Image (cartoon, grey):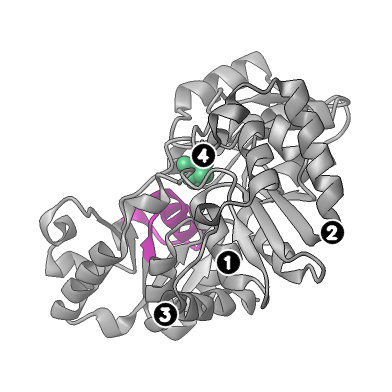
Amino acid sequence: MPYTEEYQNLTQEELHKRVVAAREKLGTKVFILGHYYQQDDVVQYADVQGDSYALAKQGAANNEADRIVFCGVHFMAEVSDILKREGQTVYMPDPEAGCPLADMADGDQVRNAWQRLEAAGIADDVVPMTYVNSTADLKAFCGKHGGTVCTSSSAGLAFDWAFKQKPKIFFFPDENLGRNTAHAKGIKNDDIAEWDPTERDGGLSEKQLQKARVIVWKGYCHVHTFFTMDHVKAAREKYPDCKIVVHPECEAAIVDAADGNGSTSFLVDYVKNAPDNSTVVVGTEINLVSRLVHMFPEKKVVPLARSLCPNMFKTSLRDLCYLLENWPEDQIVRVPEYIAKDAKLALERMLVLK
Ligand code: SF4
């Protein structure tokens, strides 16, 4: 919420008019990226909508725009800054919009954990891997230590790649995506250890670290862990013929009970390709589910439960208007070069995953 008092007093109608006027004035010099979970009032002005990594790539591929506006949360704008082409500047309408999941593992905690792996004599056997929902510092750590980044859609490929390099994976910061991906590869809970950053030595003995094939960081997305088995049972009872699809940041029990799971793009495509008149129950952020309801009126799209990401909701039309009219320096997102260099290396390893 960086705007001034003058903006506080503008009506929604005035804000819409001013955003349209600012966009017209700037033309193709500005490119607005809108994450799927953004409010409708904001996302309608996005030149492209998508999930975080796809958006960052599209920003960098744009040859005309020198200003990229990322309507999303902080780690997404960081990725956009790391991947941007020469001469581009990345801005956020609300730079305070963060991601609690990304903040659950900071660089120092991970470096300490790595030292513990070294002391246990297993660090040389481990590929560090971070979900894209993480700080640039963590991505840089992975770049430096032969690891990679993954998205929710490339996690399976990233696991395959990592196991070709070394026998173990250390996955952060989302336990559920790590665990669900490991399960999909046939790895049982017995071979998965959970690193709890609030416990001494992660709460794991040397023996546990040595036995584990996958070590998952104990972090979670509160938006996706909101869904429970009661929600699944209630949906099955109310819509016996429905299909339930969920995001892999949901807990393993929910993923197992669903008919399918995958990234935000997977969920959008699933609804798009579902037969007309069928019922699809979707377990992800409510702004996206509500949009799917309007996009596909020939299908019945139902939220598994209402779960809103307050951080994605932070970016308002007022913030966007203020940014497009003022371009304040303190709304620029810049990853320091020494971090960006190694983070880019990890992102580039993800790019070639097949
Ligand atoms: Fe972070 Fe979850 Fe919100 Fe995505 S939905 S920005 S992972 S808290």
Compare marks 1 and 4 and give the one earlier in the sequence: 4
Compare marks 3 and 2 and give the one earlier in the sequence: 2
Q: Is residue 17 above or below residue 70?
A: above
Q: Are marks 2 and 1 in contact (CB under 8 Å)?
A: no
Q: Which residues are magenta?
A: 171-189
Q: Are marks 4 and 3 in contact (CB under 8 Å)?
A: no
Compare marks 2 and 1 and give the one earlier in the sequence: 2
Calculate the distance from the C-alpha at mark 1 to the C-alpha at mark 4. Answer: 20 Å
Q: For mark 3, give the secondary structure.
A: helix
Residue at point 51% right, 36% down? 1
Q: Say which residue label 1 marks.
A: 81
Residue 2 tag number? 4
Q: Amino acid at mark 2?
A: Thr
Instruction: Judge the density around disc 2: few (<14), some (14-19), many (≥20) Cα neighbours within 10 Å.
Output: some
Residue 343 x, y percent position in the rendering? 47, 74
Residue 50 x, y percent position in the rendering? 71, 50
Q: Say which residue label 2 marks.
A: 28
Calculate the distance from the C-alpha at mark 3 to the C-alpha at mark 2. Answer: 31 Å
Q: Quadrant for residue 292, please give it.
A: top right
Q: How many marks?
A: 4
Q: Amino acid at mark 4?
A: Pro
Q: Say which residue label 3 marks.
A: 338
Compare marks 4 and 3 and give the one earlier in the sequence: 4
